[in-house]
């Protein structure tokens, strides 16, 4: 039921077109433009930046106020009081679990962490220097070849089982892609470890000796997972929803999301931060690069500052900054050259009037890049970890889409090519 009505008058058409206006629980009202197609009209919105393409109950963002809510809970509170698997449950179910529900959920995830042994042979088909994201796109899509028992997208139980499998197996596949690149044997998951601890074990453990995850680093990794779990209708999430609208299996849809995330304008931001720090090279060059960043004629940009959605501040960044400080102190690497450059840039961005007036504060990608670098994770793995974290958001939106009446996505266009003409 529409809360209000909007009336559109178009030159050449008789009378006004009445359009329903709906109000959500938060955020701007939306105008239902579907009646326009009956009048031979489409809306024009490149990038869909002014279009609500779906209704969702999962995540809400207010970029002007710096608010990010999952199921109504502020991200700062979740990062401080919760953990990644609890946030996974929240995104999937809309409510936080009871203690008993969480225990059951965690045990289910732990029991799905292994991948089919045949998957290990897939890696032999890749070059050793293949980008880990290329491997992830291929291997996640290939999961549908192994799990035929849960591919009925119209079955709620099948959708749930697919969600469990994806959440559980993504860390295993991510660690395998890293191990393959450095020529070390794959490490099987350990069900006695927590989610983040297990990932670090599979990344850095070897069969030669037992690996004991540092609790400070495991907590930092868990927070990175939490802070990247979902971010509303971004490019990769929209890709997953659009692919899902065709009836494609969930593994194929998540693979499509990984491919979209791979783009440097989306998931490659924290990787771009490290590339920028390497380009600056030394603290003595910082002043020069800061001036270049201020010059509108210079193509150089400081990466990891400001955010397209958050016009005020990124609410995830404050949490990530505190975590970053803890990690650097724990590892005693504050004087590592690239990290010294990063800390100096952070200080400049928080004090220099140019950055303060434009609200170009360090964002979550800036701090997460520094943390991952300090932990010893190579730059090529940064986007893989982002994909691992975001899998819960993708599969939650995919499941929500299929849990309610839906239709295949079919965007329209403004055609500006030649008119009909005869073949000469």
Image: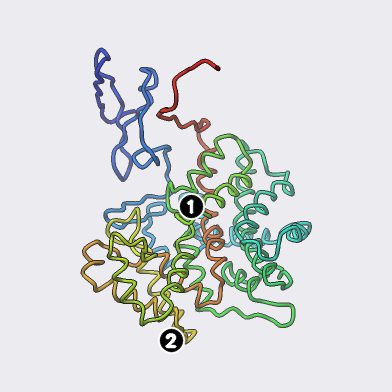
> Considering the numbered disc 1 on the image, is that residue within a helix, a strand or a loop?
helix
Vertical position of residue 351 compared to residue 246: above or below: below
Q: Which mark is residue 91?
A: 1
Task: Point out residue 96 in the picture as x, y percentages from the top left corner.
Answer: 46, 56
- For the C terminus, the image quarter is top right
Q: Quadrant of residue 195?
A: bottom right
On screen, residue 19 versus residue 271, left or right, reads left
Q: Which is more toward the observer, 193 or 287?
A: 287
Local packing at callout 1 (Cα closer than 10 Å; few below 14, some 14-19, many 20+) is many
Dividing the image into 4 quarters, which one contains the N terminus?
A: top left
Secondary-structure class at tag 2: loop
Res 96 visible: no
Residue appearing at x 26%, y 26% in the figure: 5
**Residue 398, relative to residue 356: is it above or below?**
above
Which badge, 2 or 1, is on the more N-terminal residue? 1
Identify which residue, 211 or 296, lies in the foreground. Answer: 296
Decide: is 50 above or below 6.
Answer: below
User: Residue 314: percent from the left, percent from the top?
Assistant: 34, 61
Q: Position of residue 16 (x, y in %)?
A: 25, 18
Residue furthest out toward the front: 424
Query: Visible in this render: residue 172?
Result: yes
Residue that label 2 marks: 335
In this orientation, which residue lies closer to the viewer: 34 or 405?
Answer: 34
Nearer to me, 246 or 342: 342
Q: Which mark is residue 223?
A: none
How far apart marks 2 and 1 lie (CA) works out to: 39 Å
Q: Position of residue 52 (x, y in %)?
A: 38, 38
Can you tell which quarter of the image residue 21 is in?
A: top left
Count of numbered marks:
2
Dividing the picture into quadrants, the one containing residue 189 is bottom right
Who's the residue at 25% across and 23% down the image?
8
- Position above or below: 31 against 280: above
């Amino acid at each position: 039921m529409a809360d209000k009505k909007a009336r559109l008058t178009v030159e050449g058409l008789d009378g006004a077109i009445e359009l329903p206006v709906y109000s959500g629980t938060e955020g701007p009202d939306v105008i239902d433009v579907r009646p326009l197609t009956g009048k031979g009209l489409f809306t024009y919105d490149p990038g869909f930046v002014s279009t609500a393409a779906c209704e969702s109950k999962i995540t809400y963002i207010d970029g002007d106020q710096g608010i990010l809510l999952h199921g109504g809970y502020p991200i700062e509170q979740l990062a401080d009081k919760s953990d990644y698997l609890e946030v996974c449950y929240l995104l999937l179910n809309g409510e936080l679990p009871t203690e008993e529900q969480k225990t059951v959920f965690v045990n289910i995830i732990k029991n799905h962490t292994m991948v089919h042994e045949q998957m290990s042979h897939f890696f032999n088909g890749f070059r050793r220097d293949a980008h880990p994201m290329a491997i992830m796109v291929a291997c996640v899509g290939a999961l549908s070849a192994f799990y035929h028992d849960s591919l009925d997208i119209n079955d709620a139980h099948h959708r749930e089982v697919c969600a469990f499998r994806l959440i559980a197996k993504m860390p295993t596949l991510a660690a395998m892609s890293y191990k393959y690149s450095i020529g070390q044997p794959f490490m099987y998951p350990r069900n006695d470890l927590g989610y983040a601890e297990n990932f670090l074990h599979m990344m850095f453990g070897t069969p030669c000796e037992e690996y004991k995850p540092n609790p400070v680093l495991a907590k930092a990794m868990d927070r990175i997972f939490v802070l990247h779990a979902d971010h509303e209708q971004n490019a990769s999430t929209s890709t997953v929803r659009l692919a899902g609208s065709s009836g494609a299996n969930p593994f194929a849809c998540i693979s499509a999301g990984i491919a979209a995330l791979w783009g440097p304008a989306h998931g490659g931001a924290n990787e771009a931060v490290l590339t920028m720090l390497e380009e600056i090279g030394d603290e003595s060059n910082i002043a020069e690069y800061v001036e270049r960043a201020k010059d509108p004629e210079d193509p150089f940009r400081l990466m990891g500052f400001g955010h397209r959605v958050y016009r005020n501040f990124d609410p995830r960044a404050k949490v990530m900054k505190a975590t970053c400080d803890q990690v650097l102190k724990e590892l005693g690497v504050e004087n590592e050259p690239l990290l010294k450059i990063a800390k100096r840039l952070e200080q400049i961005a928080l004090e220099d009037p140019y950055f303060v007036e434009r609200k170009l504060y360090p964002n979550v990608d800036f701090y997460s890049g520094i943390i991952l670098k300090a932990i010893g994770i190579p730059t090529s793995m940064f986007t893989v970890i982002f994909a691992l974290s975001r899998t819960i958001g993708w599969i939650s939106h995919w499941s929500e889409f299929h849990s309610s009446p839906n239709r295949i996505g079919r965007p329209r266009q403004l055609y500006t090519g030649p008119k009909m003409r005869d073949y000469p």
